[in-house]
Image (cartoon, grey):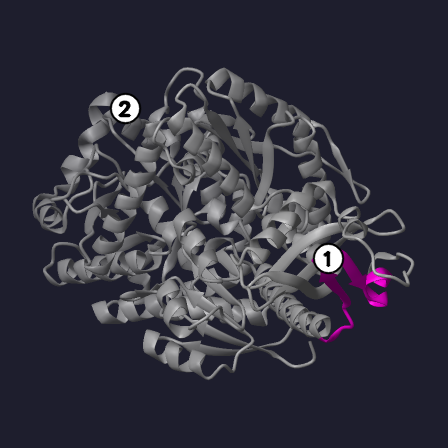
Amino acid sequence: MTEPVRVLLVEDDEDDYLITRDMLAGQERARFALEWCVSYDEALEAIGRRAHDVYLIDYRLGRHTGLELVREGFATRPRAPVIILTGQSDYEIDLEATALGVTDYLVKQDLDPAGLERSIRYAISHQRALADLIRSEERYALAVRAANDGIWDWDLRTDRIYFSPRWHAILGQPERAEDEGPAVWFDLVHADDLLRLRAAIDAHVAGQTPHLESEHRMRHADGTWRWVLSRGLAIRGSDDEVTRMAGSLSDITDRRSAEIRLQHDALHDALTGLPNRALFMDRVDQIVRRTSREPGSGCAVLFIDIDRFKLVNDSLSHAVGDHLLVALAGRVAGVLRPGDTVARIGGDEFTILLDGVVSEPEATLVAGRVKDALGQAFIVDGHELIVTASIGISLASVHMSSSELLRNADIAMYDAKRRGRACCALFDESMHRRIVDRLERENDLRHAVEHSLLEIHYQPIVDLATGRIAALEALARWPSEWPEVAPLDFIPIAEETGVIGPLGLHVLRTALDSLARWRRAGLVDDGVRMSVNVSARQLEDPSLPASVRAAIAAAGLDGDALRLEITESTLMQEPERMQQIVSEVCATGAGLHLDDFGTGYSSLAALHQFPVDALKIDRSFVGSIGAVGGGSDVIVRSTVALAHSLGLHVIAEGIENPNQLQRLRTLGCEYGQGYLFSRPLTALDMQSLLLAWSPPTAAALGDHVAR
């Protein structure tokens, strides 16, 4: 493409717009001219200009959805390709999008620059191919109408027919000088079509149809069968008796071949040749309807997802990935029964319909055969590849729809992935309940974040030698008036859905405001700092340094009052990029604590590359400290020694009893937090704790152990 691809992005979230813009700019295969529309009405106006090569439309647009925009913006099937962008995969939405003519349906979290460019390129290519095919068929139809078709004239009184030279030429037959009997025609008609042709002729002669029109096969002189279209009109006398029929014969073999090819392409995957989603669902629907009529019959659906397939595309190329998919399709089809159907429904996802399978052992046996087949190495373009798959199994039941059957298999597949990949899982209702609960929890979380309902609790970080409160850690908690949800449950959801950004900013601003208020009230001295956790998703936000700086300024504090807690595994995901981001954030004056130290694999690298102030020993080590043969004492002692040699402090998490406190003191740990001192408390309860805090009492908690 010599000219830039004109892209209209309809997205009401500026962050997602920036991500998409950077993705399009971050690849080198094509050039894009991006226009951004924020609102639904603005997008309608832009679509009306018909000035773009492709439309990228976010599914959620305030009160509207992207599919509503497609429905209103395009009176007929879109002239340019439309790609829907969504935060999470939804099979029903995918089906509705397909029905509206949407070219592709992409999940934002799975996108990368190369993948987005490839999807746009394929969408444009598909749209152009479709337009070319339509124009080609129009030209062909015109040519057929203008062609010199074969002519025939049948005298019903003498039962003789005149066939023009072109009629004979179409069938490769020698020309005859005299009129011939109908047998010359009918003897060449395919046996399966003859009765239909005669019925059409009889119906027209009887006046039941306005004209004769019949498509049928006729044998060519070379032995092949040609599809022809016979048209004709009866000529009636004054007594309304039919005396003659005349008409034409057109060779429509190419058109019929094209129709068959189009029908095949519409129902089969272009890469593997397997049935696609539409054909698969049609077959499932037929069997499910039969199951409702015949309860003794049944079927099962297997949903197969290739584990870590993206790694093949990213490391070896998409061409190798495509060749692998073709090999996978052949391998799976080779272990199935003749009556079973295997389909590719998108990406690296395959489905299998097992007709007549009604029990778990039968379905599991087939799933095992598929796993064994895929477990053998593939040799693709000179690469030896070992493939594993996660398989979900769903058994049909009475009154279950085809979409429910496939959905259940899909849910079971994700449950298999959750168990560790390379597994099979049979669907049960508890899986669906978990999905529904997860969706409800996600909606509750969005509501809580949007309305700042999440509570901030605080836990003191104590100087183990003096009992003085050295810092406070701010922790997000579920609204107390709602049914309880633990942070370990809602924080991962926040990261997956992208709301961790606003959630983190809410915690940061609230915590710094609380610290400033307590300092002004004299409840803590000016040396007490506030620790706030920062996730990997937050670090990906380029506006994070500015947000941190703004929160510090709004609270009236200096940067040194803030400590950011980041896990070492987060820092070591992309060390070079993280180093730049962390440096920008710490340029605000904020310090850096390395959280969960010792649980990752790159601790020393993290210490060398990042401006760390303190190490936080994970509670798993503190919980087993002092235990016989536990090894935690050695780990804690080594961590303290390493930290002190680098001029860093050490903070122990999860101190719950005086024995742990005394042992940590003995090993040289300076700071700690845990239930021994205080649980995480609301701001009001923390204020009461600060008023009543007695450093000598806190310092003496472990003394009786020493004595």
The local secondary structure at tag 1 comes to strand
Identity of the amino acid at label 1? Val
Question: What residue is rendered at 49% in x and 57% in y?
Answer: 105
Q: Could you tell me how far apart the alpha carbons at marks 1 and 2 are, in whole angstroms?
A: 95 Å
Please state which amino acid type lies under the numbered disc 2.
Asn
Across and down, in percent, residue 574 comes to 55, 53
Q: Is residue 379 left or right of residue 211?
A: right
- Horizontal side of residue 251 vs 94, given as left or right: right
Q: Report which quarter residue 63 is drawn in.
A: bottom left
Residue annotated with mark 2: 659
Residue nearest the observer in this picture, 23 or 401: 401
Q: Is residue 556 visible?
A: no
Q: Quadrant of residue 632?
A: top left
As displayed, is residue 198 above or below residue 545? above
- What residue is disc 1 on? 228
Left/right placement of residue 290 relative to residue 345 reads: left
